[in-house]
Amino acid sequence: MARYHIADLSRREILKMCGALASAATLVSTKLALAKAALARTPAQVLGPFYPVTDIWTKGADLTRRRDGTGRAAGQVLQVIGRVLNVAGQPVRNARIEVWQANAYGRYRHPSDNNPAPLDPNFDGAAVVSADAEGRYGFKTIKPGAYPAGPNMIRPPHIHFQVTGRQDRLVTQMYFENERYNDTDRLLNSAERKELLIVKLQPPPAELDPDLKLAIFDIVLFRG
């Protein structure tokens, strides 16, 4: 399975992301300056039943386009950025980051997903990226939809992450602020510090597409 470093983005994409990545780094630095103790580890979440079992991993850091297609995925486009750190605030260099998610209608491209929601012909929904020497990572995707996970449960929109550093591996999920089903989701609410898993969608820096939303999600491993 190939993985893609942030350096594999085009020069134009890298320049566009610089401002956003700098904002993320500034945010982390501010948190570190204010913290008197170690950073809180990102809460673990279950791997889930829809970890990709077929070769759908996107060839690059842009999930909005299928690796063998030309159209763009339906839904709100997101730029997800952040840093992978250890609890001492040190960057986890070259961390491997696997991401996978449902499409905008709430369906995974997975043979076990029997959700009747439509598949998006322009969305594979999985990628492997790599953090840089400062622990920074980034990818473009669409906001996933909510979906039924049983007779009395609807999962809120979320993106799955599996992060592998030099010593640690973490499986977690990123959620979105003010979603209807956040308060009733058993997995989200099982986390001791669930606020660490919830991001606020922000307007993009001027260099990026004005229709895009920015999500900053820092991931903290124990040793790195």
Image (cartoon, grey):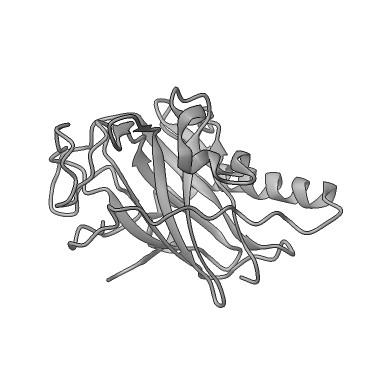
Q: Position of residue 44 (x, y in %)?
A: 53, 55
Q: Residue furthest bottom?
A: 167
**Looking at the image, which residue is at 55% across and 38% down?**
198
Quarter placement of the C terminus: bottom right
Report the label total.
0
Residue 143 vs residue 207, the one in the foreground: 143
Q: Position of residue 33 (x, y in %)?
A: 83, 50
- The part of the image, by quadrant, that contains residue 167 is bottom right
Q: Is residue 197 left or right of residue 90?
A: left
Residue 136 vs residue 183, the one in the foreground: 183
Quarter placement of the N terminus: bottom left
Q: Position of residue 200 (x, y in %)?
A: 55, 31
- The part of the image, by quadrant, that contains residue 193 is top right
Q: Position of residue 65 (x, y in %)?
A: 23, 45
Q: Up-down: is 143 above or below 41? A: above
Q: Up-down: is 121 above or below 86? A: above
